[in-house]
Image: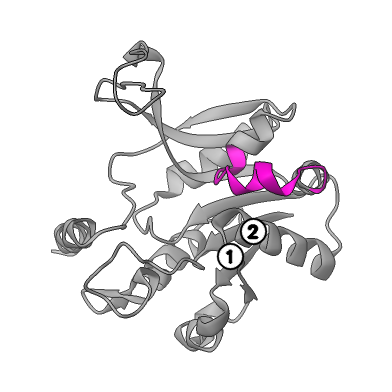
Amino acid sequence: MIYAVLLAAGSGSRMKTSSIPKQFLEIRGEPILRLAVDKFLCCPKIQKIVVVAPSIWMSHTKDLLSNPRYKNIDVCQGGQTRQESLYNAVKYIDDTYQASDADIVVSHDVARPFISLRVIEENIKALEKYDAADTVIPATDTIVVSEDNVVISSIPDRKKMYQGQTPQSFRLKSYLKIYAKLDRSYLENVTDAARILSENGQTVGLVQGDVFNIKITTEYDFHIASFLLGELHD
C-alpha cells in the first residue's frame, strides 16, 4: 500500500501573531490543514492518509476532518520533534495495518498546502528506482558555509546545491529498521527523514519540486499564501 503521512504536529511558534498552531489558521476561509489534506485526497495512488496532530489539538484536528469526505483519514498523536512525529505515524501504520516490505510512505508538511499532484506522483514513481525520494528545487542564491558562524569557510558550487521541500518518500519497513538503530543524540540533531536514510545506506533520489510549494512559517509566508490562493481561485 501507499500511505500519506501529513505532519501537522508543530506548535507554529514562529507565527508570532497567532495563538493557535499555523496548520489550523484559515486562508480565505479554509484551514491550512484541510488545504493540504485535499491535495492528497486527489491522488488516486494514495490508499491511506494519516494526519499527525499535537496531543492537545487532537480533538480539534478530528473536528476539522469530520466532513464525510475525510471519513477514511486517521489521526494519530505527534511527538516532541518533527522526527518523533514522523516515527509515531509510521509506527502507527505498521501496528494498525500490518505493513509489508513493499509498503511506501509519502511524508509531507501540512504547512506546504500548495503541493501539486505531479510532485506527489513523481515521489511515488521515484521509489521504483531508488530506496527513497526527496523533493528539491535548485538553489537560486549562493550558499555560504561558515564553521564558526563568524567567517566564511567555503562557498559550494551553486549548481550542485538544492533547497529541500517535502514530500519525502520511503519504504516503511526500511525506515523503521534504520530508526530503531539510531541513538538519541543523533536523532536530536536531525529533522529530516531524507538525511537519516541517506546517511544510513539508502539511495535517495531527487524529485523536482515547485517554487509554489512554499512552507508557511511566518506571518510573511501566510500573506504570500493568501495571495497565491486568491490568484488560483479568482
Residue 167 % position (x, y): 51, 46
Residue 76 % position (x, y): 64, 74
Q: Is residue 127 above or below residue 229?
A: above
* Residue under label 2: 84
Q: Which mark is residue 172?
A: none
Residue 163 % position (x, y): 38, 32
Asked whether the residues under the numbered discs 2 and 1 touch, taking CB atoms below 8 Å apart as contact, a structural biologist would say yes
Q: Residue at x 76, y 43 (%)?
A: 182
Q: Is residue 20 above or below residue 38?
A: below
* Quarter of the picture holding the C terminus: bottom left
**66 sits left or right of 228 in the view:** right
At label 1, the amino acid type is Gln
Q: Residue at x 58, y 79 (%)?
A: 55
Q: Which mark is residue 80?
A: 1
Start and end of the magenta stretch? 180-194
**27 sits left or right of 107 in the view:** left
Residue 138 % position (x, y): 35, 25
